[in-house]
């Protein structure tokens, strides 16, 4: 399962509204791609087309989708958002990550 924090959900809703997109027609697609200082990086975008092997989860009324390969790295991960002084933006709380880079943009398992 992939989860979303209340802060991240509120920020996603705010962005969707500002882009005149409906939460009923769009979802958050998260995936893992090669790259970054630790070897793997997170990718997040809005989408409205499901693909054949997509894994679909719903948390707090928000649909989160990932491809099957990425799910192997993201199982149990929570998408969070922070407005704090130590960093602003979306970040992933991934229990599978054994190492992350200093900026938090990439990880290794």
Image (cartoon, grey):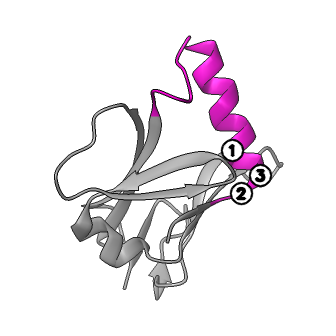
Q: Which residue is mark 2?
A: 5
Q: Is residue 88 visible?
A: no
Q: Position of residue 11 (x, y in %)?
A: 70, 36
Residue 104: image quadrant is bottom right
Front residue of this view, candidates 83 and 12: 12
Q: Is residue 10 above or below residue 15?
A: below
Q: Secondary structure at mark 1?
A: helix
Q: Give the total number of marks visible in the rendering.
A: 3
Residue at image position (16%, 52%) is 52
Q: Is residue 35 above or below residue 95?
A: above
Residue 55: image quadrant is bottom left
Q: Secondary structure at mark 3?
A: helix
Gap in angstroms between the C-alphas marked 1 and 2: 6 Å
Q: Position of residue 49 (x, y in %)?
A: 28, 34
Is residue 41 found inside the magenta-colored segment of the image?
no
Q: Position of residue 29 (x, y in %)?
A: 40, 46
Q: Residues within 10 Å of mark 1 (few under 14, many from 20)?
A: many
Instruction: Point out the image quarter for the C terminus.
Output: bottom left
Question: Dots 3 and 1: beta carbons under 8 Å?
Answer: yes
Question: Dots 2 and 3: beta carbons under 8 Å?
Answer: yes
Residue at image position (35%, 67%) is 37
Q: Is residue 1 visible?
A: yes
Q: Is residue 18 above or below residue 96?
A: above
- Residue range (magenta): 4-26
Q: Position of residue 105 (x, y in %)?
A: 47, 59
Q: Which residue is mark 1?
A: 9
Most distant residue in the top direction: 20
Q: Secondary structure at mark 2?
A: loop
Q: Which residue is mark 3?
A: 6
Residue at image position (36%, 61%) is 41
Question: Dots 1 and 2: beta carbons under 8 Å?
Answer: yes
Front residue of this view, candidates 46 and 87: 46
């Amino acid at each position: 399962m992939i989860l979303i924090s209340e802060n991240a959900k509120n920020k996603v809703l705010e962005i969707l509204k500002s882009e005149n997109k409906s939460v009923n027609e769009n979802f958050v697609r998260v995936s893992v791609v090669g790259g970054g200082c630790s070897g793997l990086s997170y990718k997040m975008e809005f989408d409205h087309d499901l693909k054949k092997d997509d894994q679909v989860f719903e948390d707090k009324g928000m649909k989160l989708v990932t491809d099957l390969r990425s799910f192997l790295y993201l199982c149990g991960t929570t998408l969070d958002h922070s407005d704090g002084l130590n960093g602003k933006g979306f970040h992933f709380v991934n229990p599978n990550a054994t190492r992350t880079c200093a900026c938090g943009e990439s990880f290794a398992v």
